[in-house]
Image: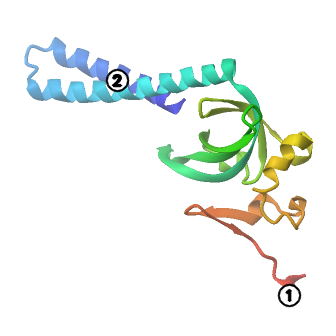
């Protein structure tokens, strides 16, 4: 969605620059090249945003309901007002295929919205997932829940005792906080 907004603003800005530049009689090749670079970049972002919007609409209309577990979260490299945008890898159980697939989706600017190993309900279609809501592990149907048991860490320990602050990901490697025995 951010590409659509930035692309629209950038394209309007480029067209404004073009209008101002080309209303003068002394516009040279440098002005034309600068205008075209701005315009092409704006249109590129605009098209990318529109494609994502169309893909989300297809997923909403034609998608299959699914459950997914957040496997990892990492920055996309995009920053808005110095705030990083985040992407998450989801392990999605697809009922019609009876398998779990890893799918990546941009989740916005708040990485704590979907803690690692939390579960979401959504729709999936052609490697795109639309997230509807977060769900508790115990609210997932039993026939689907068993497909996630392999991927949950520390199955011997109840995950109810592990908060999202106890697990962090650094360069794709997940670390779990271990309590010091002397502190207890």
Which quadrant of the view contains residue 157?
bottom right
For label 2, count other residues whose C-alpha is less than 10 Å away and answer few (under 14), some (14-19) or many (20+): some
Q: Nearer the viewer, residue 21 or 85?
A: 85
Which quadrant of the view contains residue 132?
top right
SS at badge 1: helix
In the image, what residue occupies the spot 78% across and 57% down?
152
Give the residue pinned by disc 2: 13
Q: What x and y, as percent, mark residue 118? A: 78, 49
Q: What x and y, as percent, mark residue 148? A: 79, 50
The alpha-carbon separation of the residues under discs 2 and 1 comes to 61 Å
Discs 2, 1 touching: Cβ within 8 Å: no
Query: Disc 2 vs disc 1: which is toward the camera?
Result: 1
Disc on the earlier residue, 2 or 1: 2
Give the residue pinned by disc 1: 182
Q: What x and y, as percent, mark residue 150? A: 78, 56
Residue 92 showing in the rendered view: no
In the image, what residue occupies the spot 72% across and 35% down?
97
Total tally of numbered discs in the picture = 2
For label 1, count other residues whose C-alpha is less than 10 Å away and answer few (under 14), some (14-19) or many (20+): few
Residue 150 showing in the rendered view: yes
């Amino acid at each position: 969605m951010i590409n659509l907004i930035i692309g629209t603003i950038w394209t309007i800005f480029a067209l404004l620059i073009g209008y101002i530049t080309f209303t003068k009689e002394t516009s040279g090749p440098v002005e034309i090249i600068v205008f075209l670079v701005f315009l092409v970049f704006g249109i590129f972002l605009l098209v990318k945003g529109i494609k994502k919007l169309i893909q989300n609409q297809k997923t909403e209309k034609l998608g299959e309901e699914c459950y997914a577990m957040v496997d990892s979260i990492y920055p996309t490299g995009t920053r808005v007002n110095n705030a990083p945008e985040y992407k998450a890898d989801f392990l999605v159980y697809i009922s019609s295929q009876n398998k779990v697939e890893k799918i990546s989706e941009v989740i916005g600017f708040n990485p704590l919205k979907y803690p690692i190993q939390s579960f979401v309900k959504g729709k999936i279609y052609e490697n795109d997932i639309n997230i509807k809501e977060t769900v508790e592990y115990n609210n997932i149907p039993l026939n689907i829940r068993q497909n996630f048991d392999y991927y949950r860490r520390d199955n011997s320990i109840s995950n109810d005792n592990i908060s999202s602050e106890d697990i962090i990901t650094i360069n794709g490697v997940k670390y779990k906080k271990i309590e010091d025995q002397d502190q207890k």
